[in-house]
Image: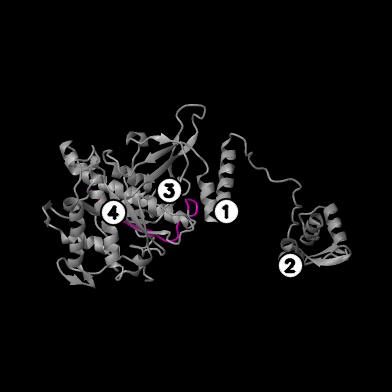
Amino acid sequence: MTGLLKRVAGTALSDPNSKSMNTRERKKAQAQAHHPFFLPVGKMAAFRVRRLLCHGRLVHSEALAVAETTTEPPAPPPSLYPPVVASLTAKSRAAKLRRRELYYQQIHDAPTVEQRLRLYTKRQRRKYVVYPQTWAINADRWYQHFTKTVFVPELPALEEAAAAEPGGEAGGVDLSGLRSVVCEVLLQEYFYRRKKRPHLYRAIDQGPSPFLTHLMPALTTRLASLNPILAVSSADFKPEVNFYWMRGETVVPRGHRKGAVDPFRFQIDDKPHCQLRIPKQLSEFVPLDYVAPGEIPVINVLPDKLPLFKRQYDNRIFIGSKLEDPCTYGHTQFHLLPDRLKRERLKRLGIADQIEAAYRANGIASLFAWTGAQAMYQGFWSEADVTRPFVSQAVISDGRYFAFFCYQLNTLALTVEADKNESRKNICWGTESKPLYEAIEGNDVKGFDDEVLLQLVKFLLNRPKEI
């Protein structure tokens, strides 16, 4: 067809009377001029009106060109063989990626949260055990790096808390009555009861521990009329709180797996003194994508330098109750610092700057583990990040000094593959420790601080927006 088109076009554009043609070419052109299908037109007319003989019919060249361009190529036949994929048992990088994808897909397709947690925690590897109450130097900075947490040295605004003033009564809160309740609990443990000399590093068992044990139910009972969520809350005493996660990666330095890339695995096994769980989630302090003003410290050395030690045992994720419990959200935790972290001992050792660092490390690690476990109880994990914040509070004390912390979990995507949103970070708000009282002389409490009591009341009056 193309050769015929060129031949006809060349014939149409040839002039029989041209002087540049020889005798033989002139005769050939004259013979072609008498051809029944020869059209003596100009160059433009020859391009537009040109006709071809195709299957015994005259077909316009433009229509033929449009038909050729609009005709879709036939679909290729289906393959008779399955697609080529990496082996599940090979040692190649492609095989490792395929095994990881299948593992993640199994977790995604798990029909229940219980099965999802079982699949997520079934692989046992050597992991770093993180202790919330530690005397390691500057442990709070390491814990911020492990948990992707920004620390803000102040507390967020608690809108639902009563605006009571120290020494007065406002918002329905009888502060003087609450003060008398706290003083009565203090005197019961430090004055009325006769106690023997405690064992070494066990002094907290005879004063601070019973004080916190009786303080929480005494205050929640008084404040239940102002905060209905406290009436349906669940109190746990010395529960277990566990959380397992992965953050960062390292190259295996030696052994038969030398050169392999493994993630850092962490486990927190916390045991708060007591805690409150509620059936509804607390209101968020800030929006999910809020950018905190601080920065997360970057630690470029192995966690062994903190020091942290590796162990291999069951990976556990637990908030203090089973999945069937209706109170699956955290409200407030109460932690009691051990005697090894008392400020008198740290001052005597010449590391007074680590007093507040111990409080911050305890608040960051404990609240991250608690809120992270709550999020995983709702079906979220590192490859299915949270769509709403999870909020909890903590009160950390040594029996006399109190520090307050609020935590908002904004992300669980802490692995190298999942950590793509740099702006989303977990946030921890906290205060420095302040004394609740100065001393106890006889049956009188000296120097009672109403501001510390007021902050404790605000924590307990915090409630969800729906209530």
Q: Nearer the viewer, mark 1 or mark 2?
A: 1
Instruction: Give the image location of residue 415, x and y in percent.
Output: 45, 46
| Residue under numbered circle 3 | 414
Estimate the x, y position of residue 67 in percent, counting from the top left.
75, 64
What is the crowding at mark 1: few (fewer than 14 residues within 10 Å), some, or many (at least 20)? some
Q: Is residue 71 magenta?
A: no
Q: Is residue 136 above or below residue 235?
A: above
For label 4, the residue is 213
Here the colouring is one colour
Please indicate, yes or no, whether residue 236 appears anywhere in the rendered image.
yes
Q: Nearer the viewer, residue 343 or 288?
A: 343
The residue under the point 86% across, 56% down is 28
Q: Earlier in the sequence, mark 4 or mark 3?
A: 4
Image coordinates for residue 375, horizontal then vertical, percent: 44, 56
Q: From the viewer's perspective, is 336 left or right of 381?
A: left
Is 392 in the magenta?
Answer: yes
Spatial CA distance of label 3 from label 1 is 21 Å
Q: In percent of the image, x 67 and y 43: which residue is there? A: 84
**Do the residues under discs 1 and 2 have CB atoms within 8 angstroms?**
no
